Image (tube, coloured by chain):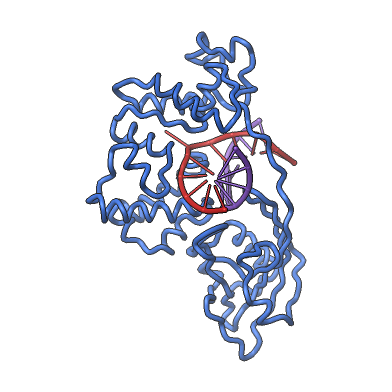
Chain colours: A blue, B purple, C red
Amino acid sequence: MLQQTTVATVTAYFQKFIDIWPTLTDLAGAEDDKVMTAWAGLGYYARARNLLKCARIVVAKHNGEFPSTEEKLRALPGIGPYTAAAIAAIAFDRPAAPVDGNIERVLARLNADATPPPALKARIKNTNAAMVPHARAGDFAQAMMDLGATICKPKRPNCSICPWHAPCKARAQDIQETLPQRAPKTPKPQRTGTVFWLENAHKDVLMARRPDKGLLGGMLMFPSQGWDASNDTRLPQLLPDGWTPLTGEVAHVFTHFRLNLNLVAQTAPRGFRKPSGYEWVNPRDFPDRALPSVMRKVATIVLEESPKRIA
DNA sequence: AAAACGGGGCT
DNA sequence: AGCCCAGTTTT
């Protein structure tokens, strides 16, 4: 959960997961959709699918116990170099050297290492490995992560209270804020699309399940067109007429593009039958379904604009 | 090596 | 309006 996501954002999700699935076996036995629903809003949905796959593999092939070596951990879905080293060090007290964003920043500054990414990661890994103590490697890793999170911050690091004030080469040259070097940011293209809000007589709304792979994989969406070429739905072709535009729009920012969505709505005409691959979902159930944030934004706008639609 | 992959908290 | 987050997988 914490991969590329702040503790502040994760905490509530972590608690919810632990409440619903207290043990690894519980999680391994969960339905896919229940896990996606619990993950909804956290983003990077491949993590949720990988977490579930991982739990099932550990239960089925490792007797329900996580392996303790980096190599075997690394082989599990969703566990990359960082997580494998972090589990080995923190859970099994192995002398592993995880490198997250915090540790990369702390050590790049400590050594005034101006290597640009992605080569920096490998250099820091070596630097870190040479520093890892034989005992309590997990505490060492967590101490460095906390140092990075609370003192050696990306902006305005609080060098005056830093325990590594004296040996820090970046501070000595007053270049700490320039390190680590960052990849040049690429501009985000703007995409535009249309969302089709179709209600039936029960005020249920037509939704579709996205394929497991790719953007918002495994999540529910309203039929839409124009912004996600590989996953355009068939609804607008099936029902080309009768759509009423709404005044509200939805703006959303993804990792690699910005999205503006226009909204249109209608009540399903007499004789309309739900095509295969779609399902009717009542808005009162939205909180308990796997809607990603962008689709929750859509629902909020439509329901606010048309109060009568609320069941 | 580079791109894909979300969303929110904080400045 | 950016920056960045306890990165991994796919291309």
Residue A292 found in image quarter: bottom right
Q: Is residue A252 left or right of residue A77?
A: right
Image x and y of residue B6, in percent: 58, 53
Q: Nearer the viewer, residue A205 or A113?
A: A113
**Taking A224 as reference, is A292 above or below it?**
above
Q: Nearer the viewer, residue B4 or A244?
A: B4
- The residue shown at (47%, 14%) is A163
Image x and y of residue A96, in percent: 36, 29
Q: Is residue A10 left or right of residue A195?
A: left
For the image, the number of numbered tags is: 0
Image x and y of residue A59, in percent: 27, 54
- The residue shown at (59%, 24%) is A115
**Taking A253 as reference, is A164 above or below it?**
above
Image x and y of residue A42, in percent: 52, 51
- Name the quarter where the C terminus of chain A is drawn: bottom right
**Taking A81 as reference, is A153 above or below it?**
above
**Taking A132 as reference, is B3 above or below it?**
below
- Give the residue at the far bottom of this rendering: A271
- The residue shown at (33%, 54%) is A21
- The residue shown at (40%, 51%) is A51
Q: Is residue A306 left or right of residue A127?
A: right
- Name the quarter where the N terminus of chain A is drawn: top left
Residue A229 found in image quarter: bottom right
